[in-house]
Amino acid sequence: MSLPSAAAQALAEFEVLQGWEARARLLIQWGERLEPLSEAEKTEANRVHGCESQVWLVAHAHGGTWHFRATSDARLLRGLLALLLVRVNGADSAQLAQLDVAGWFQALGLGRQLSPSRSNGLNAVLKRMAQLSAR
Amino acid sequence: MFHASPWRADFPAIAALQRQRQTYLDNAATSQKPQAMIDALAHYYSHGAANVHRAQHLPGALATQAFEASREKIAQWLNAPGPNQILLSHGATSAFNLLAYGLEARLNAGEQIAVSALEHHANLLPWQQLAQRKGLELVVLPLTAAGHVDLDQAREMIGPRTRLLAVSQLSNVLGTLQPLAALLALAREQGALTVVDGAQGAVHGRQDVQALGCDFYVLSGHKLYAPEGVGVIYGRGEALGQLSHWQFGGEMVHQADYHRATFQPAPLGFEAGTPAIGAVLGLGAALDYLGALDTAAVLAHEAALHAQLLRGLRDREGVVLLGEPEQALASFNVAGVHPADLAQLLSEQGVAVRAGHHCTMPLIKRLGVQGAIRVSLALYNDSSDLQCFFDALDNALGLLR
């Protein structure tokens, strides 16, 4: 599966960045572009637990490919979610299962955000995605 | 004003962390270790480890002697009447579990256990679960806005059905010193047992368990500049006598048959299995180190830094402190900023502080916040650490607001 165009754009924007400040700024901008979730979708059933902040994840399957939407009340996590979604959306279940998410964040210069001691919730979101798409 | 710590160089990890551009301000979670303690650990493991209280051989005798000498030092440090009133557990959490299981047989359905609303999970969940097992009522003593147990309400709530009071000395979230003298007196009037969680309190200044007048006092080794794996329970003589044996196994037994056994009294009867010998010796060495310092100077330094921390936080627009911190630490939020965002940007800048619920989920919910950032100090911190923190905080808020 080749890189979706939005993901290619993210990679181009992030890989040239130097320093935490520039990365944080861009992360916040990406978070603002996240496709919104309605209040009605922010239900307990859609909530991903195991995060310091509140996170909701909704999945839809269109003709065999997955389309996820997600949001959080924390801005940096919204940015991370946006970068995750541009990479995974449009994949089918088999492609999702094989996707190297750690490698993707590594390429963006955000590899540390997935380390086990991080409680930002990205790992919990990945786990939930895997459960939803395996059904 | 710059407050330098004359003890900073005694802790080799501070320089190592500095080389990694890390400022360590998460001391309420765990502490860095003094070289003297590290040397004692290395000495024990490089001169012959042996199990304690078992063997006839020389290494065993030496290890036992050193182990019991540590118990003696702990007793002296806390001004306990003697070393037999010091039980060594595998940490503060296991100490509270030992107490909750050890006292279970003394409590009957319908009776009450009182805890404060600010307890760490370690001093809440063992009592909550005990209450569920035995059909007891868990009474939660409310707090004042400043973050102290509300004594007026406590007076109403601690009554003839109260059989046990478990309360913290120094809150790990609010940094408030609890009115122990008054609370313990209320419990004593009702003939209730008292348990004091000294995990945070014991780290700041000397404690005198006899003057405090509690039945049990618990502390954690790793927060007190010693290794992980050792906790301490001081027990008043009569109170220790009320504990039933809890964990069973090696060396806590007096006589054993296939179908019955009799057990040792305190302390050994409550120390089943091989203890964390190295960690216990390390705790003894940490107390030797601390005992040689000028306690008044340490407390004055910590108080000056704490005042500087509070001043810096209160000077910044939008910062909201949790309660009114009095010692060692402060937790805060910034209006309009998610604590998780702030925590992430502080860690990006090499400032090690804690964010989240601090193992006090019920308290965080009751305070109506999503979490908080906690800055906690130790004797080796200095004003440069606070400056790093405030610079990072200002940078982070510049981005997030």
Image (cartoon, coloured by chain):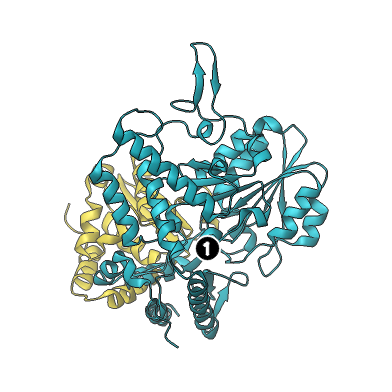
Chain colours: A yellow, B cyan
Residue at figure coordinates x 17%, y 51% from the top left: A1
Q: Residue at x 37, y 41 (%)?
A: B277
Which x, y percent locates residue B375?
A: 47, 69
Q: Look at the picture and state if B191 lies above or below A117.
A: above
Pick the front one: B391 or B20: B20
Q: Is residue B138 left or right of residue B41?
A: right
The residue positioned farthest toward the left in the image shown: A2
Q: Is residue B48 left or right of residue B383?
A: left
Where's residue A14, x and y in %?
23, 71
Chain under disc 1: B
In the picture, the quarter occupied by the N terminus of chain B is: bottom left
> Which residue was labeled with disc 1?
B371
Q: Nearer the viewer, residue B153 or B85?
A: B85
Query: B384 left or right of B100?
Result: left
Crowding around mark 1 (Cα neighbors within 10 Å: few <14, some 14 to 19, many 20+) is many
| x and y, in percent, of residue A126 in the image | 34, 50
Specify whether residue A34 is in view.
no
Name the residue type under label 1: Gly
Point 43% across, 46% down: residue? B69
Mark 1, secondary structure of its residue? loop
Q: In x, y percent, where is residue B99?
A: 59, 39
Above or below — where is B268 with respect to B307? above
Q: Is residue B275 above or below residue B360?
A: above
| Residue farthest toward the bottom in the current orientation of the protein | B1
